[in-house]
Amino acid sequence: MEGKGDGALSIRQRTLGEIAAAADLTAADVVALSGISRSTIWRLWSDAGWLGKISGANANLLAAVVPGVRPYAARAADSVAVQRSAEVCEQAGLEVDWVRVGEMVDNGAAARDLVPAMTAAVAMAGGTRDAAQALARCWGKSADGVCDAIFRPADDGGVFVDPTAVLQGAERIVDGPANDEPRAVIGRGMALHRLTRNCGYEHAPTEQRNGFPLSSAFKHRGAVTGGC
């Protein structure tokens, strides 16, 4: 995947024929194995944009018998989802390092982790009331590095050229009135953890209004989800 200078992500398009050939399958093989009509397979075979022209039912049939179709389709879907999320970030005033985002996807970061993290960044930068809850959606082992990336500048592995607005939003979560709603408790604890780990932040509120310690929130959440 490449991050283009005009603010876009892209993957190298591959024809159905290329993907099938990598598995030593001919068009006749694909017709026989998938049950899809010969005319449909031939129409899509050499078309680089075939993925956008095939029906969902036929795409599922191909994915079942042609190795490489499923990961290619997933990668294409991730590219679209991450692209849209990054565009929302830029509309909110957060300048995206498109090259870095492309590298993260190439290295295995999935849209299911990148999209919630970018959504949380927009919420924190905008100071929305649900910012803590949005950050709580980034919980989990696979999302850990991605979540760190919204707090760091691009020259330190982050996805934003200047994450100052995100950091200020996280500080508002930590320093603001405590909210005892469970997801907000998790989000507040995560904001404190990320600020401390990535920014040397020194402030340690240990309890919610009801006296519930943030450390216990993390233990409970970790026991339930297996996250970090």
Image (cartoon, rainbow, N blue to C red):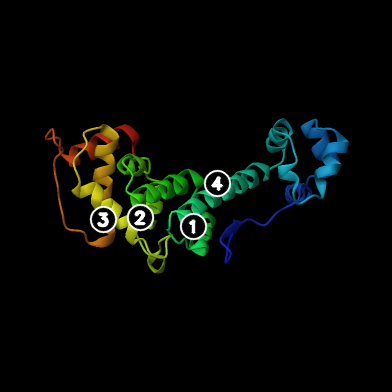
Q: Are marks 1 and 4 in contact (CB under 8 Å)?
A: no
Name the residue type under label 4.
Ala
| Residue 163, position as x, y percentages in the image | 36, 61
Read off the residue under disc 2. 148
Name the residue type under label 2.
Asp
Name the residue type under label 3.
Leu
- Tell me the CA gap for discs 3 and 4: 27 Å
What crowding class fits label 1: few (fewer than 14 Cα within 10 Å), some (14-19), or many (20 or more)? many
In the image: residue 174, left or right of residue 121: left
Which label's residue is closer to the chain start, 1 or 3?
A: 1
- Tell me the CA gap for discs 1 and 3: 21 Å
Quadrant of res 166: bottom left
Looking at the image, can residue 193 be seen? no
Which label's residue is closer to the chain start, 2 or 1?
A: 1
Please report the residue visible at 85 percent of the width from the left and 43 percent of the height from the top. Answer: 43
Please report the residue visible at 50 percent of the width from the left and 53 percent of the height from the top. Answer: 86
**Which-is-in-front pick, marks 1 and 4?**
4
Read off the residue under disc 4. 81
Read off the residue under disc 1. 104
Looking at the image, can residue 182 be seen? yes
Secondary structure at badge 4 equals: helix
- Tell me the CA gap for discs 2 and 1: 12 Å
Work out which quarter of the rendered image holds the C terminus and state it. top left
